[in-house]
Structure formats: structure tokens, C-alpha cells
Amino acid sequence: MIRHIARWTLAVGLALMGVFHFTQTKGFRGLIPEWAKKATGLDEDGIVIASGAVELGLAAGLVALPKERRRVGWATAAFFVAVFPGNVQQWRRRWSAPLLDTDAKRFVRLFLQPVLIVWTVWSTSPHRDSHSR
């Protein structure tokens, strides 16, 4: 039951952040490293929108694809690893974004990323307790 709640909480958080990427695009521009624009061929807005779409897709997958839960979990964890350079860039540039409007919040956010990765893998891993589904 705890894993179920953790997975749903993660999905809701991802969905909210995905929506923020569509509605607060400007606030996320400063998180995009130059190399990401070169690697993808997208501008900052394109990357923000694409990452928001990925967040919405992952959120949906976490709750709507129980047979693929482990794979979606690993994909979500990989996404969290992939966006970490943007979190570092945000802290270094002192760029404010939704919910991250101080240096202290941006710094703490860096340490939240490993927690999100572990939370994701744990909440989507196979478990023996049949009540946890």
C-alpha cells in the first residue's frame, strides 16, 4: 500500500510539473544548458515543452500501465538523471522557476534529485506484498 501511494504521489507530482512546463514555459528556460540545445536541435521553449510532455507521459504510465510498471519506473528514473544538469544550471545561474525562487531552494533541489530517483525505483519495483499493488 505504501508503494502504491508513493507511486501515485510521484505520478501526480510529475503531472503537475508537466503542466507547469506548458503554462510557465518562460520560468524553465534558464534550466536549459547550451549543449542540450545543440544536441537536440531545439530551442529552450522546445526543450521545455518536450520535457513537459515526457513528464505527463511518464506520470500516465506510472498509473495506467501496471504490467509495465518496472520499465516505466526505470524510464522515469533515467529522465530524472537526464534533467539533473538543468537543475545544476538553474542553481549556478540563480534562475528562478516555479517553486524555486531562492538560492537555498535551488540548492536543496539538487539533493532532492537522488531522492526522486530512489523513490521512483523503489515505488515501481516488484514486491511480494500483494496489498501493495
Image (cartoon, grey):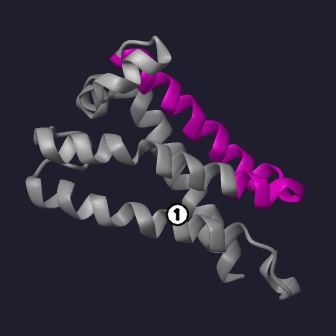
Q: Nearer the viewer, residue 26 or 119?
A: 119
Q: Is residue 124 found inside the magenta-colored segment of the image?
A: no
Give the amino acid at mark 1.
Ile
Task: Please tell me which residue is depicted at 56% across the width and 64% down the height of the picture.
Answer: 9
Crowding near the residue tagged with mark 1, few <14, some 14–19, many ≥20 C-alpha atoms within 10 Å? some
Q: Main secondary structure of the magenta part?
A: helix
Q: Nearer the viewer, residue 92 or 35?
A: 35
Query: Which residue is located at x 20 percent, y 54 percent?
Result: 106
- Residue 23 quadrant: top left
State which quadrant residue 29 falls in.
Answer: top left
Q: Measuring from the top left, give residue 45's x and y in whole percent.
A: 37, 17
Q: Residue at horizontal 73%, vertical 51%?
A: 72
Quarter assignment of residue 89: top left
- The verdict on residue 59 being magenta is yes
Q: Is residue 7 above or below residue 62?
A: below
**SS for dot 1:** helix
What is the x, y in percent for residue 38? 39, 16
Q: Quadrant of the N terminus?
A: bottom right
In the picture as drawn, the residue positioned furthest to the bottom comes out as: 129
Pinpoint residue 43: horizontal percent, then vertical percent: 37, 12
**Which image quadrant: the C terminus?**
bottom right
The image shows a total of numbered marks equal to 1
Magenta part of the chain: 44-73
Q: Which residue is mark 1?
A: 117
Instruction: Check the image and report above or below for 36 versus 96.
Output: above
Q: Is residue 92 above or below residue 9?
A: above
Q: Residue at x 52, y 63 (%)?
A: 117
Q: Is residue 98 left or right of residue 52?
A: left
Position of residue 130 relative to residue 51, above or below, is below
